[in-house]
Amino acid sequence: MRDYIIRRLLGLIPILIGISIAIFVVMQLIPGDVVSGILGIEQTPELREMWEKKLGLDQPLVQQYFNWITKALRGDFGESFRTGAPVFPEIVSRFKISAELAVLACIIAWIIALPLGILSSLKRNSVIDRIVRVVALMGVSIPNFASATLLILFLAKGFNYHTPVKYVSLFENFGGNMQIVLLPAFVLGSVMAGSVMRMTRSSMLEVLRQDYIKSVRAKGAPERVTIFRHAFRNSSIPIVTLIGMQIGSLMGGTVVIEQIFSIPGLGQLTLTGISQRDFPVVQGCVLFIAFVYVIVNLLVDILYTYIDPRISYS
Amino acid sequence: MFKKNKTVVNRALPGNESILSQLWRDPLGRAGMIGIGLIIIMAVFAPWIAQYDVAKMHAKDKLTGPSAKYWFGTDNFGRDVFSRIVYGARVSLVVGIVAVGIAAGFGYLLGMIAGFFEGKVETVIMMVMDVIFAFPSILLALFIVSALGTSIVNTMIAIGIVNVPVFCRTVRASVKTVKSTDYIANARSIGLKKMAILFKHVTPNVMAPFTVQATLALSGAILTEASMSFLSLGIQPPNPSWGSMLSDARKYMERAPWLVIFPALFIIITILSFNLLGDALRDVLDPKLKL
């Protein structure tokens, strides 16, 4: 197992190099030059030269890439053009907020999706099954920004409730934090729940028709044991894969929801960076998010061996 | 005996008529086809269906509720919401179709090459796909658009690039399966050239998962466009987009809820219809994957 993890970590190196090159190349495509963006109408040839030197833009592209990536490897993502503050600490503090939102969304999604998916598979073609399938399809078909906007409208019109806009940290004020985070987490979770429900139902149906489930039932095992210990455990590989992908895409993929609910997460930082053309922030955020995404996928692969001991990576 | 098995035989047979009739028989597939049909009619006949010019401001009728004059009401500029939604269908469909066309075209070519030739070519192609796949799709699309600039063409390119890996992986997996079959070995043994085998014999056999993927990707592409426009980084004014209409409406939604409800409803109907059709198509073309 340790060898597998080391091998996978080594395998990540070319992917991460590829990601960093892709980010660097895309940033080079940006029309207009960075120095003009910083200096605006105040630019003089001297100031321009000074800034180009300061940012390393007077060097060849390959050199610029190596300068950027070696600094990034040391956790130095440069300074924001707008605020002058180091980018990396800002990314880490925003990441904590996005991670809290993502974890809550996942918990809500699992609480909704797993029992309903299992129930739907056990009551195949019944009324319950049909309702669950329609609910799941609605979940995957309603964009999170549409459901969020409709939910805000419903709460405002129906209950005169307006979501708080000032974010407070979980550790400073738990109740206040939950008031802000629960609603967006519910919106994200309900969208995630749709696909998890569909996957749970189809995987369970696949496993429930296997001979070993018939054997377990024939041996007189209680239905609870048959379903949870034998059927659900064996059907959980594709579900875990899907959940892993969803967690990965929640990093940065929450950009729209963060914008709607004014949550200062990683997605909002990226979006602000894009709209303000703050390139070190955008570059740093995108690299960080891609890194987290790749690591989450690795953790999912490792998790497989715990769920299904037949899977061996040796 | 053959009559009894007619349904089963039809399911296995390729051919548009048979697939269409099977889709129509499935209630969910039929609902999807009707929904998509309505959106296509709206998009194609927009100039005849829309009551007013999409940019025309009726200064005296700002934020007017739905009425006989303005079916879906007017926005804060006094523009007719119904007309903007009708033209928005055109934008959504065009962006979706072109973006999926870009993704499907490149994904098909790269997947074919990777699956058929294998070796170093496959390693390099799949590594590039893994790199693209390592970004959350909306984030990558926003990133590309921020570099290329916001425009309808760049939105299509960005969404297209984001979707290439899904097609590439689907085609590659199918090519690898088809490649190991006896009829491909036979085609090789009679001396057919690689290109002939690839396009004449392998292509028709990867079309089923490819078509299902294209239908589902269309809903994803429309969703990404709406999300980007919602964030003001997709379709730019004065072009109407359901996403930007919804975003602009948030300021006035308590006074004028119709500004939120109608664009949201049409986004949901469109995505739901494509998902319903995609699911039904998968059931028809690949019953093993039935969800």
Image (cartoon, coloured by chain):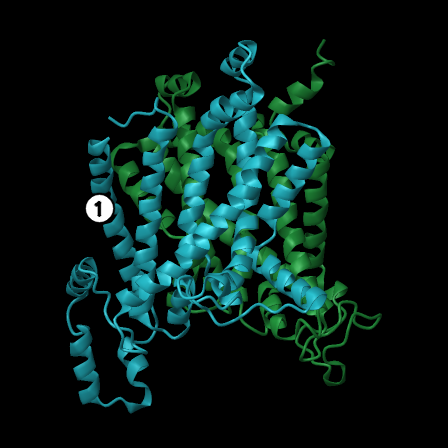
B244 left or right of B256 in image: left
Identified at 29% across, 91% down, the residue is A42
Label 1 belongs to which residue? A13
Chain with colour green in the figure: B
Vertical arrangement, residue B38 with respect to residue A229, above or below = below
Chain with colour cyan in the figure: A
Give the x, y percent position of residue A54.
Answer: 17, 77
Give the x, y percent position of residue B266.
Answer: 67, 57
Identified at 59% across, 60% down, the residue is A148
Q: Nearer the viewer, residue B10 or A239?
A: A239
Q: Quadrant of the N terminus of chain A?
A: top left
Give the letter of the chain under mark 1. Answer: A
Res B291 seen here: no
Secondary element type, mark 1 = helix
Give the x, y percent position of residue A50.
Answer: 17, 83
Res A162 seen here: yes
Q: Quadrant of residue A20?
A: bottom left
Q: Residues within 10 Å of mark 1 (few under 14, many from 20)?
A: few
Give the x, y percent position of residue B131.
Answer: 32, 48
Identified at 69% across, 30% down, the residue is B22
Specify the amino acid type for callout 1. Answer: Ile
